[in-house]
Image (tube, coloured by chain):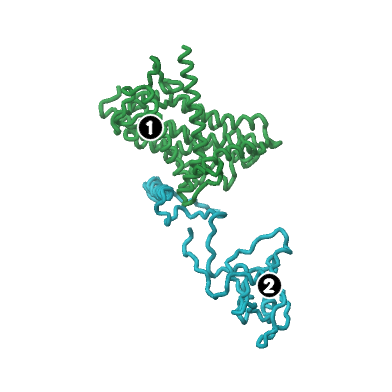
């Protein structure tokens, strides 16, 4: 095997000495260093707080904003009278690839509506957050736009959400939350 | 006699304490400076009663963590050498501070106290000798570990430090020729007055070569092939706990030592243009000289850290090429050039 290591001489004498290139590299990191030092000092003095120094998000205290289209914890929309929009058509359990949605239907007392869910459970420990249930829903009842990251649990059986919990999501005004474009 | 002994003891305690304090401060500075350079925040979580103090308490937590960790000696290691290696590394890095002057001669209670622990006519040779010892720390550590990766690291450390030790010594010959002495105190005193007296203007090439070789001697990026944490982890792969901590501290201690030597040889030591220490009362001279001195050392450390967090690691053949094919010939050329200039200007004998 004929292996030829790259030669420094191809860069020319000045380039091969790397001195100027090293200085250029140092200038970049140096500029970042002083920019951030000045910004941190200004922040400490209460000035220019809108301009962030560093991209770190101090996690437990500061949460990263959830993107508007993120698929997170499910919720079920209500009708104007407060009853769940769901008509228990069984499309979402049918389409769910992980089989984590369990709907039990019952007859609806309202004359124009055929069925309603007697229970609507989603096993969050099995959900893959694909959003197919949202796509499948014919009445825009189930959504994944609650903006809440599903909590973890030490007990997998506690990760089953019930209809009441799903209805307790944010009000269904149909508008998505506005999200800051840039990270803090 | 007793007064001189007391003065020597106080100076030794001061230098030891200051060097150790600066070392621990440098662990914090390294984390914070790299964070600033990379648009991060850096260590800031350790708090005492809700006070975070810019993450300074991480110095304490780091120390506690290092000491509390299990200090494991692998059964296949050579126990005595395994113990000895970090000691040698630490002592070799620390012993150089003995000959580095850190201030002017001050008159306290009618006694002239030179602010250097041991003033010697051959101070720089003592320093280079002490630095030459530091190779034993890394080499013994790697060889005694009984681990092939550690042994590879030890071989790399040996080859690298042999290469750069030569350039390190030769790059300073120009400085000795300019000042005609190896005495660090006299070299520093010769640079007072104008800013143009600083060694960096008399020996720009020598400074560049010494700085490069010094960065290589500290075995930190971009010269960290003996460690090479992404490939072989290096000569201290088997070390844990405080033994590893001593290796780590020795690197930082060497960084401070080289910053101090660079300050003395190339940046006028504790002298600044416009400050006459002889005209000041002794306590003022002490405070001002220490402020100037530590400011210069801190700037040097900052520059070393800037380089360490900017440049990627050399490939091993590039590293040796740089040492033998660039630094060594350039150092020799620098000697010739300096000699020619001295003769041309009618100096020398």
**A116 over B180 or under it: above or below:** below
Residue A130: % across, % down: 62, 71
Chain appearing in green on the rendered image: B
Residue at 49% across, 38% down = B26
Residue at 65% across, 88% down = A112
**B4 over B275 or under it: above or below:** above
Label ID, residue A163? 2
User: Looking at the image, which is closer to me, B96 or A85?
Assistant: A85
Residue A180: % across, % down: 48, 64
**Residue A130 shown left or right of residue B105 in the figure:** right
Do the residues at pointers 2 and 1 share their chain? no
Does the rendering let one see residue A98? no
Q: Nearer the viewer, mark 2 or mark 1?
A: 2
**Residue B89 shown left or right of residue B106 in the figure:** right
User: Looking at the image, which is closer to me, A101 or B7?
Assistant: A101
Which residue is identified by label 1? B292
Residue that sits furthest to the top in the current view: B1
| Rendered-image quadrant of the C terminus of chain B | top left
């Amino acid at each position: 095997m004929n292996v030829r290591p790259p030669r420094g001489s191809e860069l020319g004498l000045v380039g091969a000495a790397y001195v100027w290139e090293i200085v250029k590299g140092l200038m970049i990191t140096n500029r970042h260093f002083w920019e951030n030092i000045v910004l941190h000092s200004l922040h400490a003095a209460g000035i220019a707080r809108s301009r962030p120094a560093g991209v770190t998000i101090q996690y437990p205290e500061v949460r990263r904003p959830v993107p508007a289209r993120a698929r997170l914890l499910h919720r079920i929309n209500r009708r104007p009278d407060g009853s769940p929009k769901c008509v228990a058509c069984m499309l979402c359990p049918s389409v769910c690839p992980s089989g984590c949605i369990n709907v039990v239907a019952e007859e609806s007392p309202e004359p124009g509506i055929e069925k309603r869910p007697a229970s609507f459970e989603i096993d969050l420990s099995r959900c893959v957050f694909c959003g197919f249930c949202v796509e499948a829903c014919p009445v825009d009842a189930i959504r994944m736009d609650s903006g809440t990251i599903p909590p973890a649990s030490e007990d997998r059986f506690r990760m089953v959400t019930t209809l009441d919990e799903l209805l307790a999501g944010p009000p269904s005004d149909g508008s998505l939350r506005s999200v800051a474009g840039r990270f803090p | 006699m007793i007064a001189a002994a007391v003065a020597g003891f106080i100076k030794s305690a001061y230098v030891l304490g200051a060097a150790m304090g600066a070392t621990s401060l440098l662990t914090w500075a390294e984390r914070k400076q790299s964070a600033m350079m990379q648009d991060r925040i850096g260590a800031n979580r350790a708090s005492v009663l809700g006070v975070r103090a810019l993450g300074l308490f991480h110095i304490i937590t780091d120390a506690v963590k290092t000491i509390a960790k299990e200090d494991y000696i692998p059964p296949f290691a050579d126990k005595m050498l395994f113990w000895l290696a970090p000691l040698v590394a630490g002592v070799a890095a620390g012993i150089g501070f003995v000959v580095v002057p850190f201030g002017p001669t001050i008159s306290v209670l009618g006694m002239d106290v030179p602010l250097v622990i041991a003033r010697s006519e051959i101070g720089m040779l003592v320093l280079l000798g002490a630095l030459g010892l530091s190779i034993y720390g890394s080499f013994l550590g790697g060889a005694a570990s009984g681990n092939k990766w550690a042994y590879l690291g030890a071989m790399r450390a040996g080859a690298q430090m042999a290469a750069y030790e030569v350039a390190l010594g030769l790059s300073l010959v120009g400085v000795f020729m300019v000042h005609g002495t190896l005495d660090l105190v006299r070299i520093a005193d010769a640079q007072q007055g104008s800013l143009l007296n600083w060694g960096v203007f008399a020996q720009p090439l020598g400074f560049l070569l010494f700085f490069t070789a010094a960065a290589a001697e500290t075995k930190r990026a971009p010269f960290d092939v003996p460690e090479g944490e992404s490939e072989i982890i290096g000569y201290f792969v088997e070390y844990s706990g405080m033994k590893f901590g001593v290796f780590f501290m020795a690197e930082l201690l060497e960084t401070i030592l080289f910053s101090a030597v660079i300050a003395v040889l190339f940046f006028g030591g504790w002298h600044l243009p416009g400050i006459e220490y002889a005209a000041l009362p002794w306590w003022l001279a002490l405070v001002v000289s220490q402020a100037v001195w530590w400011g210069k050392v801190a700037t040097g450390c900052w520059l070393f850290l800037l380089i360490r967090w900017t440049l990627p690691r050399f490939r091993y053949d590039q590293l040796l090429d740089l040492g033998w094919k660039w630094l060594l010939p350039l150092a020799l050329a620098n000697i010739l050039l300096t000699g020619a200039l001295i003769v041309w200007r009618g100096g020398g004998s």
